[in-house]
Amino acid sequence: MNHHSYRVAIVRAVGSDARQLNALAQGITTIAPLIEIVDDEHVLVPMRGPTRYFGGEKAVAEKLFSCAPQHVALAIGIADGRLAGLIAARMAQPLFIVPAGETAEFLAGINVRYLEQFANVSAHTLSLLSRLGLSTCGKIAATSKQLLADRFGPDGNTLHTLCSGADLHPALTEKIPTLYYAESHYEDPLVQVDAVFVATQELIAPLMAKLQGQHLAMCRVVVTLTTEHDDTSERVWYSAAGFYEQGLLERVRWQVTTWLEESSGLTAGVHNIAVNVQNTVPIGHEQPRLWGGRSESDAAARIAIARVAGVVGQDHVCVPEWQGGRDITREYELVPAHRVDLAHNEATIHRVTPGVLRPAAWSGDMGQHAPMQNIVPPEKVEVLNDQYAPVEVTGRHAVRSEPQYIRRNEQLFPVRAWHGPWPVEERWWDPLRQRRVVRMQCLVHDGQQEHGWLVLLEHRTWWLVAVYS
Amino acid sequence: MSSLELAREQLAQQLSHHKYGHHVVSLGKASLHAHRTIAVGESFVEVLQRAQLPLGLVRGRVYQCTGIAPMSLAVALVQKATAEGSWVGWCASEHLNWSAARNAGWCLERVVQVSCAEHWCEAVMALASGVEVLIVNIPPHVSPSSVRRTLLSAAVQQCVVVALGPVHAVTADVVFSATGRTWLKENELQEQVAFAAQELSVHVGGRRVPSEQCFSLLVGR
């Protein structure tokens, strides 16, 4: 294999917003055509042409660094494939180059949890891999492909390919033949973003339906918009799992809105829209359900989630996922919405249902009324007795003296009533992660009104962890 | 798909070829939603009836939950909505305990949380385009005019906004204020006594409430 053919640079724009990312993409386009916007933080740049033109990868990296918009820090990872590039970009300070041909060795020591973030591998599959002892990409690559396929189905093949350092769809270095094409020409140019959006939807919907009939989904699409003055905006969009309609439409909306904001942007209405499908993937488990898919409100919510992620960043848009454990304030964790499947009813229900994705051991729930508001991070407080000395708890989980006051932020709150303490012991079998705490409900008064607090004692320190708000 | 939805879709397809088609499509969707209210629990239905208000959350209106337990009030107010298929967006700085929300009857598969202190206005407007109920608290740095513009945008998109705590920039349509509470204990006869629930005294007022009311709301059981 000629590794240089598949060399890619992943440019990570830390903390950029939609406008800054577009400015970055515009800058990079002057260095390399056919770049891909991976998500709201990463841009993929095929390296073959630029490396030859600028005389080496470090020279290209310098050029890429010079494209950074104001107030945006760049990190660049260069490797033989998309996955290794993304991981290298995460490790880069600010540049990390994985030498050509050494990507498999680089990935060998990488923990499989990165696959969830960068290769859309489900949390369930990762949990299973860990339990099977396959905790690194190297161990997966060393496992027989046939064995993985037997255990995980088509996902097993994908896992093996990625962990071996290969790409499912190598980055485009030149225009490749079109698989499917749709184009629409408008006599009356479209002058509103919404009009372009609706027109693109009309173009994409029948194409998607046609592909779905063949159990395929488009995974690499080139969307080209042309104005009356022959100004053109062309973007390559890629999703390893395949695009659903709303996901692709949101990307087109971004393409149009950022084009409008450019100084040399739209000067006339759009009169031609072309959608060029270059790669497809089998739909696999993504089949629509027999009695219809999701409701209209679910589809609208998915679009809104994609849109708001474009505003505040993907990691700031989260959904709850059940984790279990004995701490009532931590039974659910927030995970970024882009990392979970929101498109299928069963997957979303499994995500939040106790005991489905992870085994539900005894929760340690004492039947208490769960407080409505978590304090994140927990606040250090002092639980004091009538002598203003800290309240201690014995080994048999009894308080040595009655709580009379709680000091929070230098303010003293009289305790009107309290219940507990209740012991919580988690993972006693694991010396690194074991946790032994006691918790207590307290009603305090601030002079005006009463508050219900849940406090917790760990390593002789009291913490305010939740409030009955 | 109902016959009404089918007819609307056919109409949208026909009109979308017209150069103003996209306007008609979006108006059609809004007008279908506009006359619908979003369901609320039994306790709220009763008090809304006494207050001579529509028996549900009216799209495009701002509800305020305030007093000593704003989050418990908001969670109870929205519980039925999530159970009946509405999506809820949480745009507040307070961290909701998801276990408590589930215990209160929320369907957590239709909830999304956005952390958006910096771009609060833009995030709320973007989220309002797709979720039916938004729970927000207004960051202090956002100007009153921006708050009004943002909430107006959410209202235009037929989204119900539930504001936690004080709202200075706008007057909420309906205000639920928890003015007092009684703690209920469990396992009184055993050693393990705990606060198992709270009974809130709630006052209902606001500029769209013809007749102010009070009611009791049990939270946590």
Image (spheres, coloured by chain):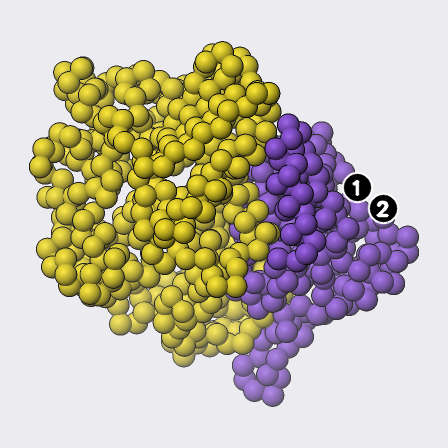
Relative image position of residue A153 (x, y in whole percent): 25, 61
* Relative to B192, residue A169 above or below: above
x 47%, y 67%: residue = A353
Does residue A258 lie above or below B188 as drawn? above
Please determine whether, in this image, residue A365 is positioned above or below residue A232.
below
Label 2 SS = loop
Q: In the rendering, which numbered label is found on residue A169?
A: none
- Relative to A94, is A241 on the left or the right? right
Kind of element beneath mark 1: loop
The quadrant of the picture occupied by the C terminus of chain A is: bottom right
Q: Chain of mark 1?
A: B
Q: Which mark is residue B207?
A: 2
Q: Quadrant of the N terminus of chain A?
A: top left
Q: Is A263 situated left or right of A60 in this image?
A: right
Label 1 crowd (10 A; few <14 / some 14-19 / many >=20): some
Could you give the CA–CA distance between mark 2 and mark 1, rounded to whole angstroms? 7 Å
In the figure, the purple chain has which letter? B
Determine the chain carrying the residue at label 2: B
Could you say where residue A272 lies in the image, as x and y percent from the top left? 48, 23
Type of amino acid under label 2: Arg
Q: Position of residue A339 (x, y in %)?
A: 39, 49
Q: Residue A23 placed where, x, y %?
A: 41, 20
Query: Among the chains, which one is yellow?
Result: A
Going from the N terminus, do you reach mark 2 or mark 1 first? 1
Question: Please, what is the three-letter code of the amino acid marked with disc 1?
Answer: Thr
The disc at residue B171 is 1
- Neighbour tally class for label 2: few under 14, some 14-19, many 20 plus, Cα within 10 Å: few
- Is residue A209 visible to us here? yes
Residue that appears at 58% across and 79% down: B193
Number of marks present in the image shown: 2
Closer to the camera, A402 or A304?
A304
